[in-house]
Image (cartoon, rainbow, N blue to C red):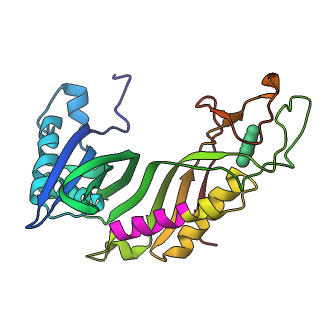
Amino acid sequence: MAIAKLADNRYGKSLVRIVRVTKHEDHHDLDEWTVQILLTGDMETAHTEGDNSKILPTDTMKNTCYFVASESKATSIEEYAKALIDYVLTRQSHITSAEVIVKSHLWKRLTVDGKPYPTAFMRGSEEVATTRVVRQQGGEFEVVSGLDGLFVLKTTQSSFVGYIKDHLTTLPETTDRLFGTVVKAEWTYTDDVNIAGFDFNATRELIRETMVQTFAKHESLSVQQTLFQMGEDALAATDTIESVYMLMPNKHNLLIDLKRFGLENPNHIFVPTDEPHGTIEATIVRA
Ligand SMILES: O=c1[nH]c(=O)c2[nH]c(=O)[nH]c2[nH]1
């Protein structure tokens, strides 16, 4: 008798990189995407017997990513992910579920002589737009959209007082500190998202702009409070989203003791540190 049986399994291709140039009469658009595709289905005998008759090679999945990027008219990563899933599920009936994750890297149009140049771009920052789309065979799309790598920092309007003190406390209370973080956000949608023509890009831009403005203006009593406010303001900005997950590491900047050199340091000279950092995350939903 066999001592093992196959439990959950899936397979696919990761880190499929695509640059797409869309040529219009008077300008080009540039997208750079990193794609992951994962398929679930009846792969039992592939694992237990080495029977590959139901295996769509991951190499073919990679090519499908390129093919759909060329053929689909998708103007958002969400539409692209949906088109890719559709392509696979309609042709491979034994695949029960497909998941596609896309990261879109930020390219900004170059400005030349004070005007946006139609065909030249600059890599923006480490920020990415993200999406995760899943569909069961015969089911509806489940879409999560987000952003990651949005590094922001405010130089005041940030305090941290009133926390637990015990014999291991060394952190001084402060009513004025730097607040730096790399925002990751992921939101789920209400049913509107399945309406054809839903504008994922405009929704992401609205949410991003709302979060950035709240971050800048908030009189922060903690990262936790600012994170919640950013999520709440995003929910208030559009009724098309249902919940927002946010991850905001506290990227500490340590005030340098300049007294050793006979100088005051009124929040002027810091050393930024990557490690260790605080990790603050929460999901914010409608009340
Ligand atoms: O905003 C903050 N939240 C914390 O939970 C925390 N913990 C810490 O050491 N500094 C901070 N700052």
The vertical placement of 176 against 52, above or below, is below
* Prevailing SS of the magenta stretch: helix
Q: Quadrant of residue 53?
A: top left
Tell me the quadrant of ligand 1: top right
First to last magenta residue range: 200-212
In the picture, the quarter occupied by the C terminus is: bottom right
Residue 99 in view, yes or no: yes
Marker count (numbered) = 0
Is residue 146 one of those drawn in magenta? no
In the picture, the quarter occupied by the N terminus is: top left
The vertical placement of 241 against 80, above or below, is below
- Give the image location of residue 236, x and y in percent: 56, 75
Of residues 158 and 118, the one nearer the viewer is: 118
- Give the image location of residue 138, x and y in percent: 25, 64
> Who's the residue at 87% across and 49% down the image?
162
> Who's the residue at 84% across and 31% down the image?
170
Is residue 207 one of those drawn in magenta? yes
Q: Is residue 280 left or right of residue 163?
A: left
